[in-house]
Image: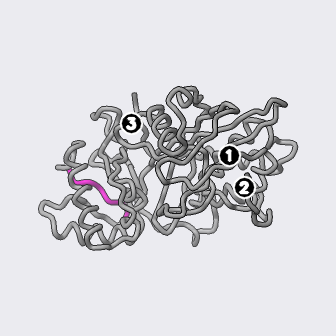
Amino acid sequence: MSEPSKSSSYSFFNIVEKCDNYPYSDNTKSSSKPNDIPLLLDNDIKVGLLLPPTVEALKEYNRLKEPNPFIIEDKYVKFAAHLNTFESRTEIVKQLFNTWREEKIFPALSGWRDELYPIYGDPKSPKNIAFVMERCAAPLFGVLTFGVHLNGYTRTEQGQLKMWIAKRARTKPTWPGWLDNAVAGGIPYTLSVRECVIKEAMEEASLSMEIAEKAVPVGAISYFTVSQRGLQPEIQYVYDLEIPLDVEPKPLDGEVECFYLWDMDELVKHIKADEFKPNCALVVIDFLIRHSIIDPNNEPDYLDILNRIHRRLDFPTMTI
């Protein structure tokens, strides 16, 4: 079930750096730091980071709206005082991104999903949700987003550990043809983490609810990616699922081309060949650490890897 891989030219730390590539504050190479400014709610809570092209587009949009929806200063952009509710913020953000989409200002909006992500930061609102916004626009506001990834693995009768790996469909708008976790997806506004796992398991891998409900939450990874689409601080909840030997994941919704079942040596080879979607590689690396396949005795960057896949992100999160 394997395909030829590229030469193994990357270390695990190289792969982690590719995903977690937003400069740290102690990085002395100031030229590498994005020239971003914070996006604040009317309550002064930071919910995002804006790059100069987004700030300029907001200035132009502000000129067309009365009263102005944003207060735009050199060091920050802030929702105006009259946008102080979930409903009012959500509506103005919806209007803004619809306008930018129609005017084709940002390529990121060409991948429109009609899927809403929650943005946190308003203690007065249920679950701390300040507003919701279109998924593909998240990098333009540099807001924290959440997903869930599931490691589907098996143990042979001899006890050998193997993992199911998805190959993304070549028609996917992002990372077509790259390797992925068995099940993965962003968490939309309307679903809990567990509901999302079960839904994605059926849609992407044809795994029944009876099997998917046995998935075990094992933690989370976090990282901050700078890409051509913008700024992407992300947290991925991680689940493990031991899939019975007589069950084979199968593509269902067209997002996956096929599945491979690889032992750990084969899995490592494809990671180091840089064939995985970057954040999916981090999920697998986390699995390898938790199962002592990567350990302090065989990995010189062990502690740095642990720190980089559990990055502190200075943004509000959900409250229960």
Q: What element does badge 1 sit on?
A: helix
Label 1 or label 3, whichever comes before in sequence order: 3
For the record, the magenta segment spans 75-81
Q: Amino acid at mark 3?
A: Leu
Q: Is residue 212 magenta?
A: no
Q: Nearer the viewer, residue 205 or 141?
A: 205
Relative image position of residue 169 (x, y in whole percent)? 54, 59
Specify the farthest residue to the right: 297
Question: Which residue is label 2 attached to?
Answer: 271
Q: Residue at x 39, y 43 (%)?
A: 188
Residue 181 percent coordinates (x, y): 61, 47
State how far apart marks 1 and 2 are (Cα): 8 Å
Callout 1–callout 2 Cβ contact below 8 Å: yes
In the foreground, 234 or 181: 181
Q: Of marks 1 and 2, which one's residue comes earlier in the chain?
A: 2
Left or right relative to 170: residue 88? left
Mark 3 lies on residue: 191
Disc 2, SS? helix
Q: Position of residue 206 (x, y in %)?
A: 53, 40
Q: Is residue 127 above or below residue 24?
A: above
Q: Which x, y percent locates residue 118?
A: 36, 44
**Is 206 on the left or on the right of 139, as rendered?**
right
- Secondary structure, mark 3, is loop
**In the rendered image, which residue does mark 1 sit on?**
284
